Amino acid sequence: MNTSVKSTVQPSYKRDYFIYVPKKDCDLFPAFTTAVELETDKSTIRTQFYVGSYRGFSRNLKPWFEAHPELEAGDTLCITVREPGRRYRLEIQPKKPKDLLS
């Protein structure tokens, strides 16, 4: 069973402080809008998993985005389940150097 999801950063993530979760991966997350904990390299964020026309993490993320000015569109975020429906881990996936992509 897969316990992590990858999400490609879009310009709207940094503008709206929102991390989108693809619909195909939503079975790892609550079925309704609910408070969850998101562990990061900086701290544990008490956030909200939003369920509506879009699904994703939608509250208290501004400090995390501001702590990562290097984050840009096209980067990959990895969200791993720690405790289903309650706790998740957010990590920025390192980019592969261009000479190692082949």
Image: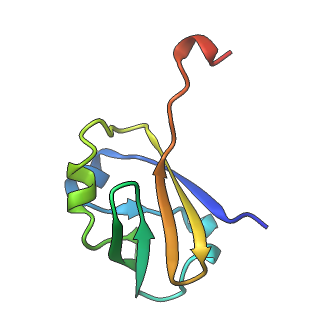
- Residue lying at 33% horizontally and 71% vertically, measured from the top left: 45
- Residue lying at 28% horizontally and 44% vertically, measured from the top left: 68
Side of 10 relative to 1 (left or right)? left
Furthest residue toward right = 1
State the image coordinates of residue 99 (x, y, percent, origin top left): 58, 10
State the image coordinates of residue 79 (x, y, percent, origin top left): 53, 60
In this picture the colour scheme is rainbow
Side of 26 relative to 21 (left or right)? right
Q: Is residue 51 visible?
A: no
State the image coordinates of residue 50 (x, y, percent, origin top left): 39, 78
Q: Is 74 placed above or below 38 here?
A: above
**Quadrant containing the N terminus in the rendered view:** bottom right
Furthest residue toward top = 99
State the image coordinates of residue 96 (x, y, percent, origin top left): 55, 25
- Residue lying at 21% horizontally and 59% vertically, measured from the top left: 63
Q: Quadrant of residue 71?
A: top left
Q: Quadrant of residue 69?
A: top left
- How many numbered marks does the figure carry? 0
Side of 31 relative to 58 (left or right)? right
Depth check: 29 or 90 in front? Answer: 90
Q: Is residue 60 visible?
A: yes
**Quadrant containing the C terminus in the rendered view:** top right
- Residue lying at 59% horizontally and 59% vertically, measured from the top left: 5
